Image (cartoon, grey):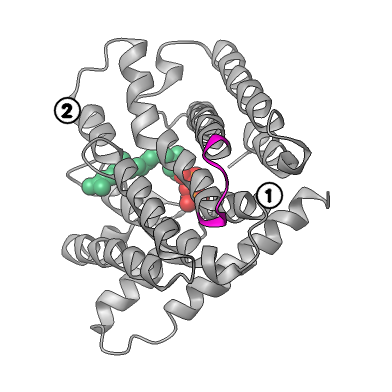
């Protein structure tokens, strides 16, 4: 297994190159809208979700990049759409993201809403250009839509903003809906597009949920350290040490599940370790 930084960089470059191809020329897209879409897509995202899709695809013996790359990129566009919306004044009302002004600050609210809608639609356009067998593509699209809709990200967001997060099970549910399921589906999509067996796909989904919870709790811990825990956070219920132990527990569970699938799933174990130790 090559060094993780190299592994990540190679995949990140693939994703960035494929995304750049989609956003080189505006064509007939109105200029300010195109500029706003570009601003958010290329503002320094870590590309974790598409890296996960590419990695799972490889570990499941997927070969043709033109099967999976459009899915990996589409997933990143949906992620970008969700962040733009999350930052809006009517949601979290954030001025900064990735150390840059949020989209509605750099442009304006109207443009931000429209750019995020256009990115969302663009994701589905990309899903249709994948060369993977149509039956796999439909399955992947079905899985993805379930995790981003009214019982997915949007459910998590409304519970987060409008709900009373009075106990840990509610917080856990929000974190699962807002973050973990979308991470899990990023993992799962690579397997579905590669044509993995159902048993493997199911295990990868379960491991992906543990990985997604780890990702969110690590985020809570990082936010708490920087004193910006404005979101509902595990650190509001537990001290940092306890939160770290819970994160460790999710990491162990994710790694156990990945390793039960065999040695070729090792890259996913390494990504889990990386997420557990990440600093941004
Ligand atoms: C769809 C209207 C609408 C709103 C969706 C739920 C939601 C709003 C957004 C989710 C936003 C959010 C803050 C989720 C938490 C997940 C999380 C830690 C996101 C940050 O992911 P990273 O670290 O981001 O992968 P980068 O910047 O690397 O892309």
The front one of 152 and 206 is 206
* Residue at point 56%, 43% (across, down): 197
The label on residue 162 is 2
Precedes in sequence: disc 1 or disc 2: 1
* Residue at point 60%, 13% (across, down): 241
Give the extent of the magenta segment: 193-199
- Determine the secondary structure under disc 2: helix
- Determine the secondary structure under disc 1: helix
- Is residue 119 magenta-colored? no
Measured as percent of width and height from the top left, residue 227 is found at: 46, 29
The front one of 79 and 101 is 79
- Residue farthest to the bottom, as pictured: 27
Q: Quadrant of ligand 1?
A: top left
Q: Quadrant of the C terminus?
A: top right
- Give the distance between the C-alpha atoms of the residues marked 1 and 2, in whole angstroms: 40 Å
* Residue matched to label 1: 59
Q: Is residue 198 left or right of residue 60?
A: left
Q: Residues within 10 Å of mark 1 (few under 14, many from 20)?
A: many
The label on residue 262 is none
Measured as percent of width and height from the top left, residue 11 is found at: 65, 61
Q: Is residue 34 left or right of residue 25?
A: left
Can residue 118 be spotted in the picture? yes
* Residue at point 39%, 63% (across, down): 40
Q: Is residue 155 left or right of residue 79?
A: left
Measured as percent of width and height from the top left, residue 192 is found at: 50, 50
């Amino acid at each position: 297994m090559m060094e993780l930084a190299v592994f990540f960089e190679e995949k990140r470059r693939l994703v960035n190159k494929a995304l750049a191809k989609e956003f080189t020329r505006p064509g007939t897209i109105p200029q300010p809208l195109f500029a706003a879409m570009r601003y958010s897509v290329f503002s320094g995202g870590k590309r974790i979700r598409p890296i996960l899709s590419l990695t799972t695809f490889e570990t499941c013996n997927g070969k043709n990049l033109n099967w999976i790359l459009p899915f990996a990129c589409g997933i990143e566009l949906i992620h970008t759409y969700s962040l733009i919306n999350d930052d809006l004044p009517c949601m979290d009302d954030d001025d900064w993201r990735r150390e840059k002004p949020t989209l509605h600050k750099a442009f304006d609210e109207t443009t931000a809403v429209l750019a995020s809608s256009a990115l969302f639609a663009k994701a589905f356009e990309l899903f249709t250009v994948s060369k993977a067998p149509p039956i796999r593509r439909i399955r992947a699209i079905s899985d993805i839509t379930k995790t981003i809709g009214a019982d997915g990200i949007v459910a998590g967001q409304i519970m987060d903003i409008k709900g009373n997060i009075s106990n840990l099970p509610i917080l856990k549910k929000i974190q699962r809906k807002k973050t973990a399921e979308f991470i899990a589906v990023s993992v799962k999509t690579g397997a579905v597009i590669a044509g993995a067996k159902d048993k493997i796909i199911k295990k990868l989904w379960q491991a992906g949920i543990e990985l997604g919870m780890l990702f969110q709790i690590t985020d809570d811990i990082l936010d708490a350290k920087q004193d910006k825990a404005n979101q509902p956070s595990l650190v509001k219920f537990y001290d940092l040490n306890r939160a770290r132990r819970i994160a460790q527990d999710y990491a162990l569970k994710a790694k156990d599940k990945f390793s039960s699938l065999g040695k070729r799933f090792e890259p996913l174990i390494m990504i889990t370790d990386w997420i557990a130790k990440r600093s941004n």
